[in-house]
């Protein structure tokens, strides 16, 4: 029986000003915490990036998932613009470096938590699996995050439907 491949979950959290509306950021942080806890239970690695008015920040480079990272997620504030393309580029770079280090069969999963409110659609990061967790709860929704998921051939999950 072949060993299970190493797995990296790269969580990119949009913490822009628009995510502050109607508690989007708080709900997105709860999903990020759930993802980190699940990864820790499975013995996977995680990386955590933030896209906010402060720029694209790496809060946790690829490392074994630890429940203590929840403190970092809870402390995230929001506001300003959305440097999503820069955050996704950094996520891709970190994931490629991690895959080179672990070698063998490695799976990399991107979790993008966003409301999709950016001027220009970002390109799909080169990770094996991409999941767009869509926080766009406007009526009617803008729908950009859903469009990215379709164009990227990624999974799409509405933030409000997250379990």
Image (cartoon, rainbow, N blue to C red):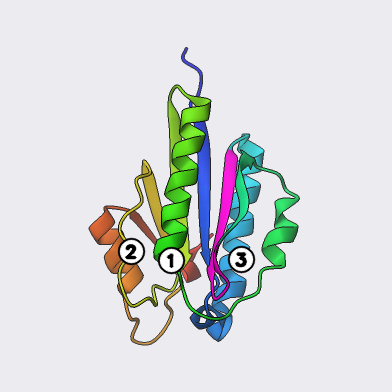
In primary-sequence order, the first of circles 3 and 1 is 3
Name the magenta segment's main secondary structure: strand
Residue closer to the observer: 95 or 160: 95
The residue beneath circle 2 is: 122
| SS state under label 3 | helix
129 falls in the magenta region: no
**Residue 115 versus residue 162 in the image, above or below:** below
Say which residue appears at 53% left-offset and 54% top-offset: 11
The alpha-carbon separation of the residues under discs 2 and 3 comes to 21 Å
* Image quadrant assignment for residue 104: top left
Q: Are marks 1 and 2 in contact (CB under 8 Å)?
A: yes
Q: Assess disc 3: are there few (<14), some (14-19) or many (≥20) residues with their C-alpha within 10 Å of its C-alpha.
A: many
The alpha-carbon separation of the residues under discs 1 and 2 comes to 7 Å
54 falls in the magenta region: yes
* Image quadrant assignment for residue 27: bottom right
Q: For the magenta stretch, what is the residue range?
A: 45-56
* Horizontal side, residue 48 vs residue 94: left or right: right
Say the numbered circle drawn on residue 29.
3
| SS state under label 1 | helix
* Residue 17, image x, y percentages: 53, 82
* Residue 47, image x, y percentages: 57, 48
* Image quadrant assignment for residue 43: top right
**Residue 157 versus residue 125 in the image, above or below:** below
Residue closer to the observer: 17 or 42: 17
The residue beneath circle 1 is: 84
Mark 2 or mark 3, which is nearer to you? 2
In primary-sequence order, the first of circles 1 and 2 is 1
* Horizontal side, residue 112 vs residue 76: left or right: left
In primary-sequence order, the first of circles 2 and 3 is 3
Say which residue appears at 47% left-offset and 60% top-offset: 87
């Amino acid at each position: 029986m072949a060993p299970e491949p190493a797995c990296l979950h790269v969580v990119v959290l949009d913490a822009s000003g628009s995510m502050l509306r109607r508690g989007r950021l708080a709900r997105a942080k709860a999903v990020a915490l759930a993802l980190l806890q699940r990864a820790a239970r499975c013995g996977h690695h995680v990386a955590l990036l933030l896209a906010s008015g402060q720029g694209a920040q790496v809060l946790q480079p690829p490392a074994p998932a630890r429940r203590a990272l929840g403190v970092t997620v809870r402390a995230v504030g929001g506001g300003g613009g959305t440097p999503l393309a820069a955050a996704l580029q950094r996520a891709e770079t970190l994931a490629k470096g991690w895959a080179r280090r672990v070698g063998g069969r490695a799976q990399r999963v991107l979790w993008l938590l966003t409301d999709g409110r950016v001027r220009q659609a970002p390109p799909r990061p080169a990770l094996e699996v991409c999941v767009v967790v869509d926080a766009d709860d406007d009526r009617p929704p803008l729908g950009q995050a859903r469009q990215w998921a379709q164009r990227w051939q990624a999974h799409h999950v509405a933030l409000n439907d997250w379990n």
